[in-house]
Amino acid sequence: MEITNSTSNSAELQVAFRLNPGATAAEITLKPHQKLTAEGGSMIAMSPNISLTTSTHTKKSGGLIKGLKRMFSGENFFLNHYTGSEQGGTVWLGTALSGDMISKELRGETLVIQGGSYVASTENIEIDLSWQGFKNLVSKEGLFWIKAKGNGTIIFNSFGAIYPIQVNGEYIVDTGHIVAFEESLNFKLSKAGKSWLSSILGGEGLVCKFHGTGTVWVQSHNAGSFGSIVGPKLKPRK
């Protein structure tokens, strides 16, 4: 099955998501001279006339420190930059974990994405990191979130299926299932049950309570839980 995001705005990307039982791949059509920045190692295939360069950050502001900050967030040290030729071209992108991908048009607002879920963005999207302090140390999730802001298209992925939840007031989400959320939302960590004992025994632990108006994108699978199940079964390297 194919889902295509089609718009009349010439500045927006044309993205088709190929939905298969195992995972989603994104076929991105670049117009002549249109630029795309993508996570290093995410390319599956591309047209032979696409120009490719590599840096540690966005094409206009590379830097060793920003590359190191990306590594701490769970992303790759390098970013790849694709440019369409006079005839344009296509780029296919995939992700390390099986799951969905989704694209969103930003029009000046800020999107907060969990470390490891960023896939690609157009050149006018600024990608940076936001330190979440002791909140995430306690929640045992990633220490950094990625902040994306600007005007253009951003693509991010999930582990398993991805679902948008519209928040108008308050909504509770398990910390391991958060993919992204709009910065218009505030959140605080809280116990899942009425008491700490019930939260721990129920296997939920800490959750995020979102407040405000905006969208939270959640994933059907939890990478941490998956790793704790699969990890002990893997044979150690000799």
Image (spheres, grey):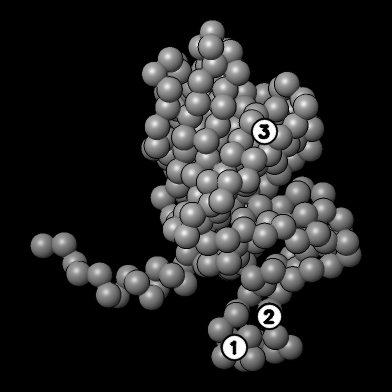
Pick whichever, 100 or 71, lies toward us. 100
Pick whichever, 115 or 132, lies toward us. 115
> Label 3 neighbourhood size at 10 Å, few (<14), some (14-19), many (20+)?
many
User: What amino acid is found at the position of numbered circle 1 in the picture?
Assistant: Gly
Q: Residue at x 29, y 75 (%)?
A: 232
Dots 2, 1 in contact, CB < 8 A: yes
User: What amino acid is found at the position of numbered circle 3 in the picture?
Assistant: Thr
Note whether 217 is above or below 208 in the view shown: above
Identify the image quadrant of residue 129.
top right
Q: Residue at x 60, y 32 (%)?
A: 121
Q: Earlier in the sequence, mark 2 or mark 1?
A: 2
Note whether 94 is above or below 171 in the view shown: above
Of badges 2 and 3, the one in the foreground is 3
Q: Residue at x 73, y 21 (%)?
A: 10
> Label 2 neighbourhood size at 10 Å, few (<14), some (14-19), many (20+)?
many
CA gap between label 2 and label 3 equals: 34 Å
Of badges 3 and 1, the one in the foreground is 3
Name the side, left or right, on which 124 lies relative to 212. Answer: left
Place of residue 43 in the rendered image (x, y in percent of width and height, measured from the top left):
42, 35
On residue 153, which mark appears?
Answer: 3
| Secondary structure type for disc 1 | loop
Dots 2, 3 in contact, CB < 8 A: no
CA gap between label 3 and label 1 equals: 39 Å
Q: Which residue carries the number 1 mark? A: 202
